[in-house]
Image: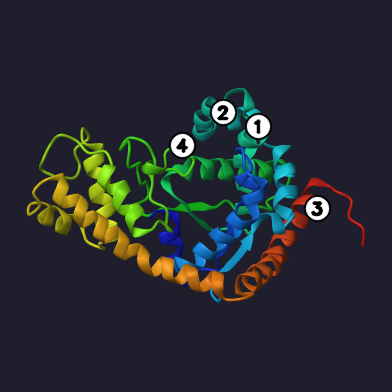
Amino acid sequence: MGAIRNWVETQADYENFFCVVDLHAITAPHDPKTLASNTRNIAALYIACGIDPEVSTIFVQSHVSAHAELAWLLNCVTPLNWLERMIQFKEKAIKQGENVSVGLLDYPVLMAADILLYQADLVPVGEDQKQHLELTRDVAGRFNDLFQSVLKVPKPLIRKEGARVMSLTDGTKKMSKSDPSEMSRIHLLDKPDEISKKIKKCKTDAIRELAFDDRDRPEANNLLGLYMIFANKTKEQVQAEAATWRGWGDFKTVLTEAAITHLEPIQNKYDEVVKESGYLDRVLHDGREKAAETAFKTLNAVKDAMGYLRLK
C-alpha cells in the first residue's frame, strides 16, 4: 500500500532498480530452510503487483556482492551515534533483548549502500523508512566531504495515501510482518477466508458512526483508509458511503469484499509467475547482471576516492 504501489505507478518514469533484500532479512532470527524460498516468493510478488521486468530491474541483494562491500566501506565513515539514535533499532532491540545483533544496528548502513550504489535520484519508500533515508543522505554527504563527490545524495518519494498502514489489532502501531500475531496483518497471498477472518476480528472502537481524521479513533482512520485504497475511492466518496452503513458490522463486510477483490488479480498473477518454468530464474539472472554493472562502477569509484590499490 505504500512503497510497492508507488513503485508500480512510477516505474515508467524512471530507470528503476528493485532488490529483494535477503541480507537485511537475517538481521532478525531466520530459518535457513525458508530463506531461499521466501526470497523467490518476494521476487514473484514484485512482478505480481505490477513491476515489469521489461521496464524495471529486479534482483536479489546478496547476488550483487557490491552491496556488502560498500556497506563495510561506509561503516568506516559512519559515526556510531548516528546508528544508535535510529528509532527502528531502539524498538527492535527492546524486543530482541540480549540477542540483538550488530547487523540490526548496522541495517541502515547496508540500506544506504543499497541506494547509493545505483546513484539514485529518488527512493520510493514507505513513511517508516524516511529516517533511514535521511541517514543515507547524511552518509553520502559525509563521504563526499571526507573524500570527493562520488555519491549522489537521493531524495524520498512517498505517497500521501497508504504510506503508513496500521495494525489490524492496534491502530496506533504499524502493520508489520514481524508482529507475532498473524491477525495483525493481511498478507498479499492470504486466502479469502483468511482475509475475512482477520477483518471480522480486527480491533474497532465503541462509536457506531465511522469517520476519518479523529485522533482518538486510530482504528477508524486506519480501516477507512484501507477501504479507500482497496476500493480506489476518494476520502469524500468513502465518507459519503459510510453514512449508509449500519455501524462496524456493515463496514467490515464491505471492507472484506474490497480487500479480496483487490488482491485477487495479484494472487492470480503470482500463480502464473511461479508456475512458468525457468521464468523467475531468468528475471533474477538478468537483473543481477544489469544491477552488477551499475553497482560495481560506483563501488570502484568509491574505492578510488578512498585510495585503495587497484590492479590492472
- Residue 293 can be seen in this image: yes
Q: Amino acid at mark 3?
A: Asp
Q: Residue at x 36, y 66 (%)?
A: 264
* Numbered disc in front, either 2 or 1: 2
Relative side of 293 to 193, left or right = right
- For the residue pair 217 and 199, the one nearer the viewer reads as 199
Relative side of 190 to 137, left or right = left
Query: x, y percentage for residue 146?
Result: 71, 41
* Numbered disc in front, either 3 or 2: 2
Dot 3 falls on a residue whose secondary structure is: helix
- For the residue pair 252 and 225, the one nearer the viewer reads as 252
Residue under pointer 3: 304
Query: x, y percentage for residue 179?
Result: 45, 38
Labelled disc at residue 96 = 2
Label 3 crowd bin: few (<14), some (14–19), many (20+), radius 10 Å: some
Q: Amino acid at mark 2?
A: Gln
Residue under pointer 4: 180
Label 4 crowd bin: few (<14), some (14–19), many (20+), radius 10 Å: few
Residue under pointer 1: 101
Q: Amino acid at mark 1?
A: Ser
Q: CA distance from mark 3 to mark 2?
A: 39 Å
Dot 2 falls on a residue whose secondary structure is: helix
Q: Are marks 4 and 3 in contact (CB under 8 Å)?
A: no
Labelled disc at residue 28 = none
